[in-house]
Amino acid sequence: MSELRGAELGDASRRSNADHDLSHLYAAVVSARVAERLGRGARSPGGGVRSNGDRLTTALVAYEEALERYGLPVPPVIRDELRLRRALP
């Protein structure tokens, strides 16, 4: 019984770490998406649109890798967006 309880607690601890990591990474994706949308309207001469796009790509890759590391499926929307972004020059 105590072994089973220990396994359950270990899984709960691992899950809470995964939830914590993934929530922070998803927040980075959302923040990068907002920055990219705002950057599109600003049209700054410093090339902010490209750097915001790179920031979003980096955030999406980090989120995808974390999902895979925790053995969770990557949502098709994330997978497809990454495929499109990686195909851009």
Image: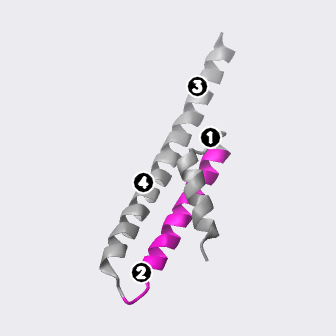
Q: Which residue is mark 2?
A: 48
| Crowding near the residue tagged with mark 3, few <14, some 14–19, many ≥20 C-alpha atoms within 10 Å | few
Q: Secondary structure at mark 4?
A: helix
Residue 89 position within the rendered picture, expressed as x and y whole percent measured from the top left: 61, 77
Q: Which residue is mark 4?
A: 27
Quadrant of the image for the N terminus?
A: top right
Q: Residue at x 57, y 46 (%)?
A: 76
Mark 4 and mark 2: Cα distance apart in space = 20 Å
Q: Which residue is mark 1?
A: 73
Does 66 appear in magenta?
Answer: yes
Does 10 appear in magenta?
Answer: no
User: Disc 4 residue type?
Assistant: Ala
Q: Secondary structure at mark 1?
A: loop
**Image height of 2 relative to 74, above or below:** above
Quadrant of residue 27 within the rendered picture: bottom left
Foreground disc of the pair 3, 1? 1
> Which residue is nearer to you in this view: 75 or 28?
75
User: Disc 2 residue type?
Assistant: Gly
Q: Is residue 69 left or right of residue 26?
A: right
Mark 2 and mark 3: Cα distance apart in space = 46 Å
Q: Are marks 2 and 1 in contact (CB under 8 Å)?
A: no
Foreground disc of the pair 3, 4? 4
Q: Which mark is residue 23?
A: none
Q: Report the span colored magenta.
A: 45-68
